[in-house]
Image (cartoon, rainbow, N blue to C red):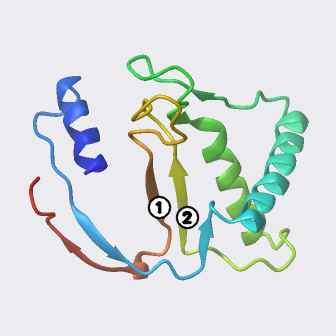
Amino acid sequence: MRAMEWAEARVRLGKYKEAFVVGAIIDLRNCLNLLERENLELLSIAHASFVRIQAAAGGDLPENKDISTGKPGDKLLRFLDCAVIKNLHSMIEEDEADGVEPFDTVRGMFVEGGKPYDGSGFNLLTHTQIAVINEDCIRGIFLPRPG
């Protein structure tokens, strides 16, 4: 449902002519699950490494940013997060991550949107996203049922 809402919003912005969503059956395998503390600790290490690399190169750190049409604070443009995750993958490839095996997928939860009621700890548009690194993890694709 959230994917279709996102696609429909892109149509309203004039980015696309038609909203369309494809479903997938995904075997997560070795997943960089960003809902687990040990994986967030890996990201912390990757961030520190990325900061050192950028400083040595004289480059600025990218920043996560709000989109102009979104709720302030949602930080939907995840430039820093993307760079840190890419750096973690590079560290693993270069064997700088203390024997961490390469990840097949990345799973994260994204908190966004307003509250469903006063005092709520939930947000209306919170959702999970999965990025597939190893295409063998895609077991099938399908068209979701409307509505």
Pointers 2 and 1 in contact (CB under 8 A)?
yes
Residue drawn at point x = 60 percent, y = 36 percent: 79
Q: Which structural element holds mark 1?
A: strand
Q: Which mark is residue 49?
A: none
Mark 1, Cα crowd under 10 Å, few <14 / some 14-19 / many 20+, is: some
Q: Nearer the viewer, residue 129 or 81?
A: 129
Q: Which structural element holds mark 2?
A: strand
Residue drawn at point x = 85 percent, y = 44 percent: 53
Residue drawn at point x = 22 percent, y = 46 percent: 4
Q: Earlier in the sequence, mark 2 or mark 1?
A: 2
Q: Position of residue 52 (x, y in %)?
A: 89, 42
Name the amino acid, label 2.
Val
Q: Position of residue 28 (x, y in %)?
A: 49, 77
Does 15 sit left or right of 18 as displayed?
right
Q: Position of residue 34 (x, y in %)?
A: 63, 60
Find disc 2 in the rendering and name its residue: 106
Does 40 sit left or right of 144 as displayed?
right
Find disc 1 in the rendering and name its residue: 131
| In the depicted structure, whether residue 99 falls above or below residue 83 | below
Name the amino acid, label 1.
Ala
Real-space Cα distance between discs 2 and 1? 5 Å
